[in-house]
Image (spheres, coloured by chain):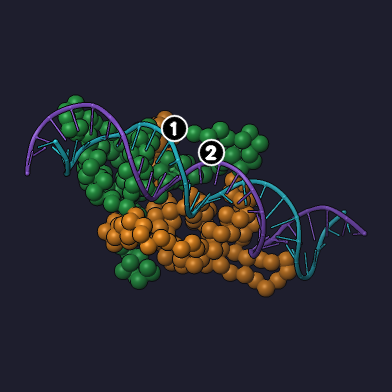
Chain colours: A green, B orange, C cyan, D purple
DNA sequence: ATTTGTGCATACTTTAGGGTAAGTACTTGT
DNA sequence: ACAAGTACTTACCCTAAAGTATGCACAAAT
């Protein structure tokens, strides 16, 4: 984390926006490019770290682990590690994360419709 | 647009991911931080540029106009300008953009639930 | 003995996104 | 005469996000 300039007007405004606009609130939590994609891949059930990696070949390991940690910190996913070697770690949706499924579902549906209509 | 290095593995993978993961497809269209927020503010009906600006004080003019242009180019919103002075320009959702409303709605609903549950 | 797979961490660099500020052209209000 | 509002555009700069690459500890398989 980098320190935020106190004089930053937009940061103050962002705080204000958070209270007024629900979508802003959501974007603060899953606003990254990768987070919705990760959540989508967890919608089918728990996945090992390496499974996610293979399922999303476009993501670098750094990004994957970084976002997994953030999602865990935000209580959207749950990490479970078995103390064996080689490591066996799985990730799955938390109840709060499950609550996001309508959003992810709606995204997936729109994508299909958009493609059908040739808007792509 | 900046040229993409041919040797970039992740770019190739991104292409691949676009075909396989619907959420990736959505993120390419509305993946920015501001786009869903803008769309949310257009969900109530058409808005003038200056109205949007005041409704989203956290966004700089540069970002606002930039994303409006991109959304227009992606056929998600429609721009209408009356040839008067001072200018009178309104933005509203296109049919395709309207199709995104379930996503935006789901986001807004989740935000409220999340706040109620004290997950904030 | 070397390679492979696991789930990360860390440093180092590049890039793209975004901030600030100024300008434009024209009109209405004071 | 001057400021203010409208919808932008452009240039300059800076930082946060992301890519690349490497290392680690340990075990099983070759």
In this view of the protein, which residue sits in the foreground, B63 or A76?
A: B63
Q: Mark 1 sits on what residue?
A: B120
10 Å crowding of disc 2: few (<14), some (14-19), many (20+): few
Image spot of residue B109 (x, y percent): 41, 44
Q: Is residue A73 above or below residue A115?
A: above
Separation of marks 2 and 1 at Cα, in angstroms: 11 Å
Q: Is residue B71 found left or right of B15 in the rendered image?
A: right
Which quarter of the picture shows residue B61?
A: bottom right
Residue at point 44% right, 56% down?
B30
Residue at point 49% right, 44% down?
A24
Q: Mark 2 sits on what residue?
A: A19
Q: Quadrant of the C terminus of chain B?
A: top left
In this view of the protein, which residue sits in the foreground, A24 or B65?
A: B65
Residue A4 appears in the picture as rendered: yes
Q: Is residue A67 above or below residue A56?
A: above
Which quarter of the picture shows residue B13?
A: bottom left
Q: Is residue B82 above or below residue B71?
A: below
Where disc 1 sits, the SS reads loop
């Amino acid at each position: 984390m980098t320190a935020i300039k106190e004089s930053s007007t937009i940061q103050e405004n962002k705080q204000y926006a958070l209270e007024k606009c629900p979508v802003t609130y959501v974007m603060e939590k899953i606003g990254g490019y990768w987070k919705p994609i990760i959540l989508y891949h967890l919608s089918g059930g728990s996945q090992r770290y390496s499974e996610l990696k293979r399922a999303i070949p476009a993501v670098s390991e750094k990004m994957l682990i970084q976002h997994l940690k953030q999602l865990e910190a935000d209580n959207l996913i749950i990490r479970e590690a078995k103390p064996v070697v080689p490591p066996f770690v799985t990730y799955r949706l938390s109840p709060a994360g499950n609550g996001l499924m309508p959003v992810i579902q709606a995204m997936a549906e729109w994508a299909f419709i958009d493609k059908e209509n040739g808007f792509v």
